[in-house]
């Protein structure tokens, strides 16, 4: 039998490793910028073209590399930070595996110019697909200048799955923000297609946060500062009134490294329990300083998942520190006594004697004494008790209908008319029922609609009683209407008297530009004021009373979460978000004319049975089920 096991060539092995480390252009920027920070750079400049697909350039003024180091740095597992296994548990640098440059060089065309401060000439190295094409001595500035072109040029399948430029640029900005937030002592700049998106000078942490996310955040942040023998926790949390359903800025950092940690996230949110509505999120920027021996950052290729040795204890410290911050800055409700109306309480003096209270009562009072008409006596008038019950016997002997046999509701599977109706509503609207109409039902002529508990519209049909969820029905109607407006660009815009200002971080502003045409098609009128600020000059007609800033923000974050590049899907996201916001709410009382209009519009829709996200809109209780109640 011939041997079938063989070693992979280095170029293929590097491409496989690159799949773990380099997933998109943002991954390249993360690795190169972190290397620059480890090289003690004070100024880092990032330039991208076509969201990094065409070119990524990272320039720093760090230590630089010698000719030998420059050549060796592109070999797998070549690192200056690890010499033995024990070093893994004493790491305070960003990179350490020695895989980043090798992985980048395996799937791109890389040009490196670098020079250490101690040497007069630097080195220029050109590598493509792990193959060194040239190496020469050149004159260049101190530090390193990496130029990464045509990412995934030799792996077309990977390149094909890259997202649209707006999505990839948003990922780049998000990665850039994470690094800039944890290194305020370093100056950063970022350019996209020669347009400056960030210019962050050296500053304090709070100023760095405001420079990235806007000065409006300044009034929302509460300081956290706790120092224990186990962990030091610092940073900021937002006030409860700033909670929002989407778009909260939530960042954890440990020893200068960004991390995701759902367990610690629960600790923060537990501190806000009863302070913010259920389902809403709060912004936070929290920094952990822990002994490197008590954490493991080597459990994920991107090093964003970190294992702590004392997670439960740190959870309690974190939760307590957030609660302390909320209490210290009066961000939680407190009992406020009105001291102006407080009664004066005299001080106790031993010399003053007090007498017990005396009880006064009338000894001649008799409630059953018959009044004689004399004045001044406490007596009651004679009550003719027999007259009160005189007609009772006669009334009991009147011709009453024979009582119907009582149904044993305790043993019945129905449980009562009201319970039956409510049970049918809950069960049949939460699961697909075989009685749902595929087409428009046959309505009875002259039919009157009824509203049940401010949520359901009841109407009679040939087969029984139909129940329609008014909120979901309106979502269905509005969604179809908005989709037509977007696709045909027929949205009617209603101008606002005082334009609202929408402030976005750069990562969100990049995505907003990609959906701007669709927002205009549905009726939004936005103008770019620069610096991530947009003026909302007009809103779609029919949504007056809604908060346009939050509405646009919710549509933007939904589009970012979906990560969709198909234009029709983006349009669908905008339409359903707008429909949910503008639909009538539960509890809203409707007139019969309004219910008739809603039902008519619902059954004019191509798919009246379900909402755009697949929830049941209507169901029917059959006539025989209703008749069964009266047998």
Image (tube, rainbow, N blue to C red):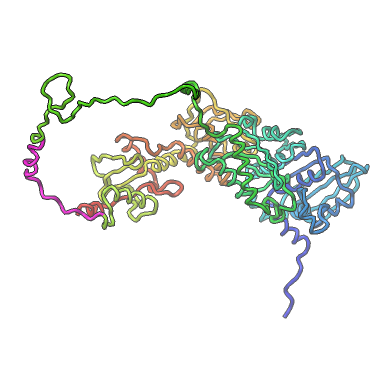
Q: Is residue 136 visible?
A: yes
Give the overall secondary structure of the magenta segment.
loop
- In the image, residue 401 lies at what x, y percent? 10, 47
Q: Magenta segment, which residues?
A: 388-409
Location of residue 376 by image quarter? top left
Task: Please state which of residues 521 and 6 is positioned toward the viewer in this rendering.
Answer: 6
Q: Residue at x 39, y 24 (%)?
A: 355
- In the image, residue 611 lies at what x, y percent? 42, 46
Q: Is residue 254 above or below residue 582?
A: below
**Horizontally, is 233 left or right of 434 in the view?**
right
- In the image, residue 75 lies at what x, y percent? 81, 56
Q: Is residue 542 above or below residue 90?
A: above
Q: Is residue 105 visible?
A: no
Location of residue 141 by image quarter? top right
Q: Is residue 195 above or below residue 431?
A: above
Task: Please state which of residues 521 and 223 is positioned toward the viewer in this rendering.
Answer: 223
- In the image, residue 303 lies at what x, y percent? 70, 52
Queried whether the magenta region covers residue 122, the answer comes back as: no
């Amino acid at each position: 039998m011939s041997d079938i096991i063989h070693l992979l060539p280095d170029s293929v092995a590097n491409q496989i490793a690159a799949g773990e480390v380099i997933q998109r252009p943002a991954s390249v920027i993360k690795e190169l910028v972190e290397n620059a920070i480890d090289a003690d750079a004070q100024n880092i400049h990032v330039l991208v073209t076509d969201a990094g697909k065409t070119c990524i350039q990272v320039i720093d003024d760090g230590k630089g590399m010698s000719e030998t180091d420059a050549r060796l740095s592109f070999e797998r597992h070549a690192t200056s930070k690890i010499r033995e296994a024990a070093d893994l548990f004493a790491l305070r640098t960003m990179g350490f595996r020695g895989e980043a440059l090798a992985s980048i060089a395996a799937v791109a065309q890389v040009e490196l110019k670098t020079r250490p401060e101690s040497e007069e000439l630097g080195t220029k190295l050109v590598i493509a697909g792990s193959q060194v094409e040239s190496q020469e001595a050149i004159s260049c500035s101190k530090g390193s200048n990496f130029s990464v072109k045509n990412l995934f040029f030799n792996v077309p399948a990977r390149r094909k799955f890259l997202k649209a430029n707006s999505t990839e640029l948003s990922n780049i900005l998000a990665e850039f923000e994470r690094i800039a937030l944890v290194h305020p002592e370093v100056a950063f700049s970022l350019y996209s297609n020669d347009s400056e998106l960030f210019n962050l000078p050296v500053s304090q942490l709070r100023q760095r946060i405001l420079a990235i996310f806007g000065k409006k955040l300044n009034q929302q942040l509460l300081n956290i500062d706790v120092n224990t023998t186990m962990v030091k926790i610092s940073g900021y949390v937002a006030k409860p009134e700033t909670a929002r359903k989407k778009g909260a800025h939530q960042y954890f950092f440990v020893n200068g490294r960004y991390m995701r940690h759902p367990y610690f996230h629960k600790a923060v949110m537990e501190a806000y329990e009863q302070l913010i509505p259920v389902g809403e999120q709060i912004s936070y920027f929290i920094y952990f300083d822990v002994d490197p021996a008590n954490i493991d950052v080597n459990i994920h290729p991107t090093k964003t998942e970190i294992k702590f040795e004392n997670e439960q204890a740190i959870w309690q410290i974190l939760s307590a520190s957030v609660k302390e911050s909320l209490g210290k800055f009066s961000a939680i409700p407190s009992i406020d006594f009105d001291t102006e109306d407080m009664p004066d309480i005299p001080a106790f003096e031993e010399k003053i004697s007090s007498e017990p209270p005396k009880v006064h009562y009338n000894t001649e009072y008799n409630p059953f004494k018959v009044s004689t008409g004399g004045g001044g006596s406490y007596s009651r008038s004679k009550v003719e008790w027999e007259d009160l019950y005189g007609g009772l016997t006669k009334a009991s002997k009147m011709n009453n209908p024979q009582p119907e046999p009582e149904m044993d509701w305790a043993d019945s599977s129905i449980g009562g008319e009201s319970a039956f109706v409510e049970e049918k509503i809950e069960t049949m609207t939460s699961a697909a029922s075989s009685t749902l109409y595929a087409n428009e039902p046959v309505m009875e002529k002259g039919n009157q609609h009824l509203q049940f508990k401010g949520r359901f519209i009841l109407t009679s049909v040939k087969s029984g009683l139909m129940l329609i969820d008014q909120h979901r029905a309106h979502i269905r109607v509005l969604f179809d209407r908005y989709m037509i407006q977007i696709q045909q660009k027929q949205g009617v815009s209603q101008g606002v008297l005082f334009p609202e200002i929408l402030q976005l971080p750069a990562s969100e502003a990049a995505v907003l530009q990609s959906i701007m045409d669709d927002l205009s098609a549905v009726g939004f009128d936005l103008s770019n004021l620069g610096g991530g600020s947009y003026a909302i000059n007009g809103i779609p007609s029919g949504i007056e009373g809604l908060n346009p800033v939050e509405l646009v923000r919710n549509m933007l974050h939904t589009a970012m979460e979906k990560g969709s590049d198909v234009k029709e899907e983006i349009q669908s996201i905008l339409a359903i978000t707008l429909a949910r916001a503008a639909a009538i709410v539960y509890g809203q009382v409707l007139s019969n004319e309004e219910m008739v209009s809603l039902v008519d519009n619902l059954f004019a829709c191509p798919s009246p049975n379900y909402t755009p996200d697949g929830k049941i809109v209507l169901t029917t209780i059959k006539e025989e089920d209703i008749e069964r109640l009266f047998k």
